[in-house]
Image: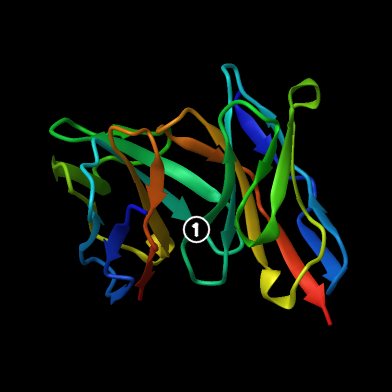
Amino acid sequence: GAVVSQHPSRVICKSGTSVKIECRSLDFQATTMFWYRQFPKQSLMLMATSNEGSKATYEQGVEKDKFLINHASLTLSTLTVTSAHPEDSSFYICSATGNTGELFFGEGSRLTVL
Amino acid sequence: AQSVTQPDIHITVSEGASLELRCNYSYGATPYLFWYVQSPGQGLQLLLKYFSGDTLVQGIKGFEAEFKRSQSSFNLRKPSVHWSDAAEYFCAVGARGGKLIFGQGTELSVKP
């Protein structure tokens, strides 16, 4: 089946720094990618939807200047957490869909902000 | 409003016993329904999905789910649970290829 890869799987950074997480579709063209956030022992909450070549659509309550999403190509979307703080520590998961309409999830990226 | 409710936060079953995880949804359009499993610190694995057709859906690892439109439910079942099934289970609803709304999750523990 189709594969969506996230990198890095784990990242630790200092408070105030920025962190970039990549989401790649390895064997299909992802016209749309979704970014979710999951706090420990909680469900996944959609942060934003990104379509290739256009600005991301953020869910209510998600700071777009804090969580920068770029979907510059049909195989890559990036989430940059700017000026990260400990409360940004979370598990971030992307999903991608292409022309078939099937949805595939990445393995997730765990961010820890010290 | 669109939502998914998993009434059971935590369920414990004995190995070999049957399992049913409940899921109720509220969705304005024709729902696409999914069940995912997540092991600690891992991503999501799709167990099964329902788009249309036969309302009893077979998935991987011996799981099945039944779509009941009248009850707005999509319960997950397994006739005999294995210790390796211990994990977090999420029900989700959405449009095909679109964003998903997830339930709160049900944590499954398996007793030997």
Q: Nearer the viewer, residue B14 or A113?
A: B14
Q: What percent of the width, then of the height, locates residue B89? A: 65, 56
Q: Which amino acid lies under the numbered mark 1 shown in the image of this protein?
A: Leu
Q: What percent of the width, then of the height, locates residue B82? A: 75, 73
Residue at image position (27%, 74%) is A13
Vertical side of B23 occupied by B112: above or below = below
Which element type, helix, strand or loop, lies under badge 1? strand
| Chain label for disc 1 | B
User: A55 left or right of B3?
Assistant: left
Q: What percent of the width, then of the height, locates residue A10? A: 34, 74
Residue at image position (67%, 75%) is B84
Residue at image position (21%, 67%) is A17
User: B107 left or right of B32?
Assistant: right
Residue at which label 1 appears:
B44
User: B48 left or right of A89?
Assistant: right
Seen as rendered, the residue at the extreme top is B29
